């Protein structure tokens, strides 16, 4: 992805990159120069976004115990 630098030295971060890093209006970013000359953009002070599976993870509350489930599967309940 590429972008154009404005006369004020500003660039628009592509939406795919903003989404990947969780960058929203007001977010802080950091630029880090690597030994090989690359510059890396990083979101500052932000936790890694939860995966789509982590968002679904949870506990449904108290349910049936093992003995109750076994009784149901055997037709004893």
Image (tube, grey):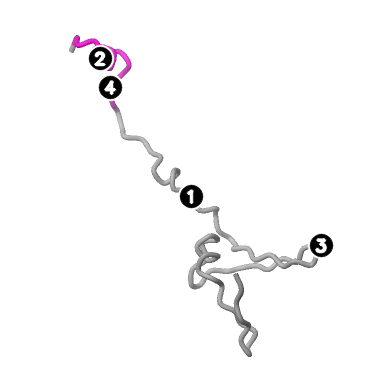
Q: Name the residue beneath numbered marker 3.
A: 35
Q: Name the residue beneath numbered marker 1.
A: 50
Residue sitting at 50 percent across and 63 percent down? 19
Cα distance between the residues tagged 1 and 2 = 36 Å
Q: Earlier in the sequence, mark 4 or mark 3?
A: 3
Residue sitting at 28 percent across and 17 percent down? 69
Cα distance between the residues tagged 2 and 3 = 63 Å
Q: Quadrant of the C terminus?
A: top left
Farthest residue, direction bottom = 7
Asked whether the beta carbons under mark 1 and mark 2 sit within 8 Å of each other, the answer is no
- Report the magenta residues as a range: 63-76
Judging from the image, what secondary structure is the residue with disc 4 in? loop
Q: Earlier in the sequence, mark 2 or mark 3?
A: 3
**Residue 71 in magenta stretch:** yes
Q: Earlier in the sequence, mark 4 or mark 2?
A: 4
Q: Residue 53 location in percent, x, y?
A: 44, 43
Of circles 4 and 3, which is in front? 3
Seen from the viewer's position, the closer of residues 77 and 47 is: 77
Farthest residue, direction front = 1
For the stretch drawn in magenta, what is the main secondary structure? helix
Judging from the image, what secondary structure is the residue with disc 1 in? loop
Judging from the image, what secondary structure is the residue with disc 2 in? helix
Q: Earlier in the sequence, mark 3 or mark 1?
A: 3
Q: Residue 38 location in percent, x, y?
A: 75, 66
Cα distance between the residues tagged 4 and 2 = 12 Å
Residue 62 sits above or below residue 73 on the image: below
Q: Which mark is residue 73?
A: 2
Cα distance between the residues tagged 4 and 1 = 29 Å
Q: Name the residue beneath numbered marker 4.
A: 64
Left/right of residue 41 with respect to residue 57 in the rendered view: right
Asked whether the beta carbons under mark 2 and mark 3 sit within 8 Å of each other, the answer is no
């Amino acid at each position: 992805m590429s972008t154009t630098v404005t006369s004020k030295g500003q660039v628009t971060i592509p939406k795919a990159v903003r989404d990947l890093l969780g960058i929203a209006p007001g977010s802080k970013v950091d630029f880090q120069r690597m030994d090989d000359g690359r510059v890396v953009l990083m979101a500052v002070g932000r936790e890694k976004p939860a995966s789509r599976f982590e968002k679904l993870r949870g506990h449904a509350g108290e349910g049936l115990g093992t003995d109750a489930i076994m009784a149901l599967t055997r037709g004893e309940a």
